């Protein structure tokens, strides 16, 4: 061994011995900080739940307590240079937020205690896990057939609705059924818990011990994790990328009927598709507003082929019934010959407002909710369009007393055909009901038709101000309501207060046959401006201190005429003298050569 090597060896021996004695001293010294309580995990998103930290010092000192992240950086200071006596307990709370008040990222955090007199810092062995991520429960109904369609109940093979639940812990899982055809989902019933993680959930199709009413429903799971984060499944939380295909929607349908969208020529056959869940049903054909039965029968299959009645144009009704259930299909029938007035039914708006689930996610597919709807689907509520009994029905019944001669079609048929040509073949057009959405073809054809001398009567409100695309039977890309309708008239939103209208001008005899006073209406739509180049030729407006823009308006545009009622309750009040007289005059003015 050389002299240098001997020196190095001696130094190592001394250092090793010194380290041994220091270690022994630390082992024998008392702990400076004793941990009493440290919350191991918590969620910063649950009110009143915070991490609890309770410590005591074995010696008097001034302590600074901080929460630090895995990199050792301070995220929050909980105590600053606080004086403590020997064995005095210090209790602190941390809400999972940093010094700026923002929730810290999920992860593991430590508590560091700085001792001023000792000149050192102690990191507690117990760490705090911040977990603010809720669970992600997913429910999928077991379907017969494809995944992109609703499960129809009762099923042809019988049995209950079965569904899978993913991403939940069985002890904390709760199952619910919500009905979704209202403005927002509403709880229908609580479903029984599953017996094991691998078992399917089950719904027997009943609510409060009775068969569930026909409507769309969605099965919802709720899960709570170990720290209290709770979450509901879709639709209360959006689906995530990577979720399994399908949905949790169930449509209860005992009986449904779907008629043709386009008119059928009298004497020709038309088809009504009937879903009776594989059971037999009775059917009856009659004209709207008339009690006389034209044809009736009993059938079982889903395809019902009938002969369109011969006679004048009109709307016919096919009623199907089974047990205590009933559904209708509306069938426009075009009579022989051509007539001056074309009555247009708002089939696009009927389906745009139809609260039916197309894709099985449990939510209704409407133009207002998610911007899409199919034309070839049964209408909910037994087949009666939304608002039909208050809007289209009264006017159509009036045209049959006495029988007016007209042609009939739908806006969907005009859109997929030749709208401009079909309009030009008539002197006037009556837009029955509230056509909220128009396809681009009809929206362009209507103002051009009026400019060339056509006449339009529109008793609806909130109408003709939105566009929608119709392609391959699918409605999509609806626009928001414009302030102007397709004729360029600037319309105010519908006001909701009692109003009385008095005729202010009438150059065309629109109000002939009445006393010129319209009272008792609680909603109205003012025409703020008649549109470029339009001239008001008849109007009725509010009188007195609240006098404003006209509500009932007739305008000359080019060589044609447009008549608006501006009153949502117009067709409901068809039995009143002034409403009835003006409606009949509007019909006469629309049909004049």
Image (cartoon, rainbow, N blue to C red):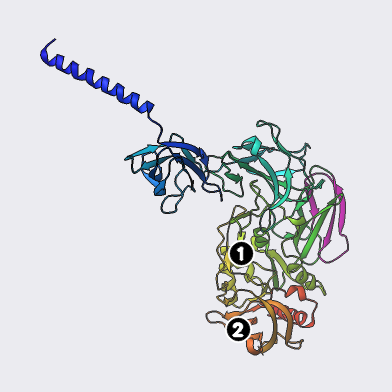
Evaluate whether residue 450 shows in this view: yes
Q: Tell me, yes or no, whether the highlighted magenta stretch contains residue 470.
A: no
Instruction: Give the position of the C terminus as an image quadrant.
Output: bottom right
Residue 306: say if magenta: yes
| Residue segment shown in magenta | 280-308
Read off the residue under disc 1. 437
**Picture residue at 30% right of the left edge, 26% below the top:** 22
Residue 325 in percent (x, y) is at 83, 52
State left or right for residue 136 relative to residue 203: left
Q: Please name which of the two marks, 1 or 2, marks the residue nearer to the observer.
A: 2
Q: SS for tag 2?
A: loop
When asked about the image quadrant of residue 174, the answer is top right
Tell me if mark 2 has few (under 14), some (14-19) or many (20+) residues whose alpha carbon lies within 10 angstroms of its own.
Answer: some
Q: Which mark is residue 549?
A: 2
First-in-chain label (1 vs 2): 1
Whether residue 559 is visible here, answered yes or no, is no
Relative to residue 63, is residue 466 depicted above or below?
A: below
Residue drawn at the location 83% of the way across and 66% of the way down: 289
Q: Where residue 572 sits in the image (x, y, percent)? A: 76, 73
């Amino acid at each position: 061994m050389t002299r240098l090597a001997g020196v190095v060896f001696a130094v190592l021996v001394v250092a090793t011995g010194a380290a041994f004695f220091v270690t022994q001293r630390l082992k024998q010294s008392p702990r400076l900080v004793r941990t009493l309580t440290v919350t191991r995990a918590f969620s910063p998103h649950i009110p009143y739940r915070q991490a609890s930290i309770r410590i005591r010092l074995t010696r008097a000192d001034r302590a600074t307590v901080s929460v630090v992240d895995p990199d050792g950086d301070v995220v929050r200071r909980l105590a600053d240079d606080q004086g403590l006596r020997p064995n005095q307990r210090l209790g602190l709370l941390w809400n999972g937020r940093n010094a700026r008040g923002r929730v810290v990222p999920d992860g593991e955090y430590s508590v560091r205690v700085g001792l001023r007199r000792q000149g050192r810092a102690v990191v507690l062995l117990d760490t705090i896990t911040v977990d603010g991520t809720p669970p992600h429960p997913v429910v999928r109904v077991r379907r017969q057939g494809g995944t992109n369609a609703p499960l129809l109940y009762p099923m042809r093979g019988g049995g209950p609705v079965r569904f899978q639940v993913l991403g939940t812990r069985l002890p904390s899982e709760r199952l619910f059924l919500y009905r979704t055809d209202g403005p927002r989902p509403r709880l229908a019933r609580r479903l029984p818990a599953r017996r094991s993680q691998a078992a399917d959930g089950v719904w027997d199709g009943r609510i409060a011990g009775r068969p569930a009413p026909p409507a769309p429903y969605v099965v919802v799971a709720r899960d709570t994790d170990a720290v209290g984060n709770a979450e509901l499944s879709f639709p209360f939380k959006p689906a995530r990328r990577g979720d399994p295909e399908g949905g949790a929607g169930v449509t209860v349908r005992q009986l449904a009927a779907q008629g043709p969208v386009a008119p059928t020529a009298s004497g020709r056959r038309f088809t009504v598709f009937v879903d009776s869940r594989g059971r037999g049903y009775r059917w009856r054909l009659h004209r709207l507003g008339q009690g006389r039965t034209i044809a009736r029968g009993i059938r079982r299959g889903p395809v019902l082929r009938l002969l369109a009645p011969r006679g004048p144009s009109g709307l016919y009704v096919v009623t199907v019934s089974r047990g205590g259930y009933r559904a209708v299909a509306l069938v426009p029938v075009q009579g022989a010959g051509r007539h001056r007035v074309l009555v247009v039914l708002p089939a696009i708006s009927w389906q745009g407002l139809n609260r039916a689930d197309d894709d099985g996610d449990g939510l209704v597919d409407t133009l207002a909710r998610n911007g899409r709807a199919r034309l070839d689907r049964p209408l909910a509520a037994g087949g009666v369009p939304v608002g039909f009994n208050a809007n289209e029905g009264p006017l159509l019944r009036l045209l049959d007393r006495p029988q007016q001669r007209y042609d009939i079609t739908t806006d969907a048929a005009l859109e997929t055909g030749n709208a401009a040509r079909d309009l030009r073949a008539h002197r006037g057009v009556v837009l029955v009901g509230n056509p909220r959405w128009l396809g681009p073809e009809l929206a362009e054809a209507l103002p051009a038709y009026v400019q060339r001398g056509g006449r339009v009567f529109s008793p609806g409100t909130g109408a003709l101000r939105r566009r929608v695309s119709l392609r391959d039977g699918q409605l999509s890309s609806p626009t928001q309501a414009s302030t102007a309708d397709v004729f360029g008239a600037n319309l105010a939103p519908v006001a909701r207060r009692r109003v009385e209208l008095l005729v202010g001008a009438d150059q065309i005899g629109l109000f002939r046959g009445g006393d010129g006073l319209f009272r008792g209406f609680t909603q109205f739509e003012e025409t703020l401006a008649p549109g470029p180049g339009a001239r008001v030729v008849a109007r009725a407006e509010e009188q007195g201190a609240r006098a404003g823009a006209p509500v009932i308006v007739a305008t000359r545009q080019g060589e044609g005429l447009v008549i608006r009622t501006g009153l949502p309750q117009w067709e409901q009040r068809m039995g009143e003298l002034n409403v009835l007289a003006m409606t009949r005059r509007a019909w006469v003015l629309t049909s004049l050569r």
